[in-house]
Image (cartoon, rainbow, N blue to C red):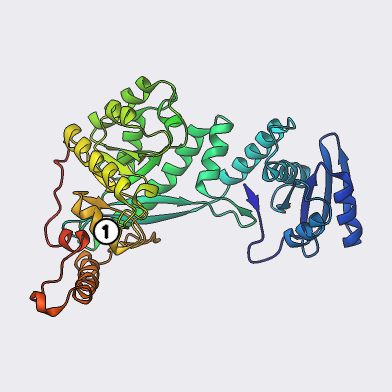
Amino acid sequence: MRFLTSHRAPAETLLWSRDTRFVRRLAESLKVGHLLELESGICLIAPATLLTEARAAEVARGSRSPVYGVVAVDGSIPVADRYLVALASAVQVSGIADRIGMGASVQVAQTKMLDLFFRLRHRVMFQPVVDLGTGRVHEYECLFRPDMPTLRTSISSMVAAAINTDRAVELDTFIVARILERIAEIEADHRSAGRPGHRYALNFTPASLVDPSFSAAALSDLVAASGLLRRSITIECTEHQAVADVKPLTRQAKALRRLGFGFAVDDAGAGYASFTLIAALRPSIIKIDREIVHGIGDKQGDAKQALVEAFVSFGRRIGARLVAEGIETRRELAMLTSLGVPLGQGFLLGRPAAEPSEPRSIEGLRAGVLSRTRRAGSAARPAAAGGMGVRTRHARSTSRPATSPTPSG
């Protein structure tokens, strides 16, 4: 969690370090600010225009590079709490919170950050998941974007804070209610215009799904109250923590599928989303982690290609469709298509937008790769060979349709 400026610079910045000499030298160089000595270290609070990360780094280089953390003080937080939040954040930024016993303070800061988060309205973005065979949209993943002007926060940092403070269910409930509200508005507009509706994917943490207070039936009622169909919603289990006991999560996945929801496992092939966990959950969708997708079309991508081939075979056996996340290049798209991955998502196909929008043309993207590959082949082989330059695997892959695994019911 880092604090920074938005369009207007915050009034103050707070720096924390255990190196008293360094902090005092920094304060002397600024000729302004307040020092606060604590058992765990020392703080300097000064105008943000003077106490910058660049200035702190400059003084630190002459002080044997001490460990420190510098953050903006969030003026939207009540005065009684804002410096505690900034202090805990600065300690966390320094990277040594647990080592000096400041973990509890970090939790206090995370709690107050969540309190602020729940008081605000935030943005919902939609990114298309595309059928790589037809180019049509399969569904839209709903991406929640925190809108907290003076806090540099991602949804991942909010999820981490919620898990650390045992508020994962509260966070997911808040986010899902906001997303369903937005989807209901969009779908109502579609119906009034005579346009067909879309499918949507909503993210949940494993912590929420296994919490005793989570109810698949209650979620179903919430979806119905929004005027939506359960079969148009996929519940996506995000990889943010290890699952100590897979049985409760398996029961919830079954309950959700029984009610008609789709069920997806995110980040397959990385982190905690192992083959064993996926086999136990029997999802309808498996999302291949973006780190596996990145560079899969390159010459050094053989190991990643083998892993995706294993996932394709695995998906067929358990009746799950695969989504390749993070597709950013035409080569990646061509390779994934040749390997039989039926669905894809990424900046190449379509970026997150405030309204569900059409993806880029698959045929156009393929044509670009094929044209470049043919030119490269012609240059590499003389015309005397019949003008039939050897095609690479990427060019060959674009000339045949993808093999799609059978979707589950």
Residue 212 in percent (x, y) is at 43, 22
Residue 64 in percent (x, y) is at 81, 50
Please tell me which residue lies in front, 386 or 283: 386
Q: Residue at x 37, y 34 (%)?
A: 273
Asked if residue 104 lies left or right of residue 259, the reply is right
List the single residue furthest toward the left. 386
Q: Residue at x 73, y 30 (%)?
A: 101
User: Three-letter amino acid code at disc 1?
Assistant: Leu
Q: Residue at x 64, y 50 (%)?
A: 2
Q: Which residue is identified by label 1?
A: 333
Q: Quadrant of residue 257?
A: top left
Using a 10 Å C-alpha cutoff, classify the residue at mark 1 as few (fewer than 14 neighbours), some (14 to 19) or many (20 or more): many
Asked if residue 37 lies left or right of residue 79, the reply is right
Q: Quadrant of residue 113?
A: top right
Q: Is residue 255 visible?
A: no
Q: Is residue 45 visible?
A: yes
Q: Quadrant of the C terminus?
A: top left
Give SS at disc 1: helix
Q: Residue at x 29, y 25 (%)?
A: 280
Please tell me which residue lies in front, 362 or 153: 362
Q: Quadrant of residue 20?
A: top right
Please tell me which residue lies in front, 353 or 46: 46
Residue 403 in percent (x, y) is at 13, 49
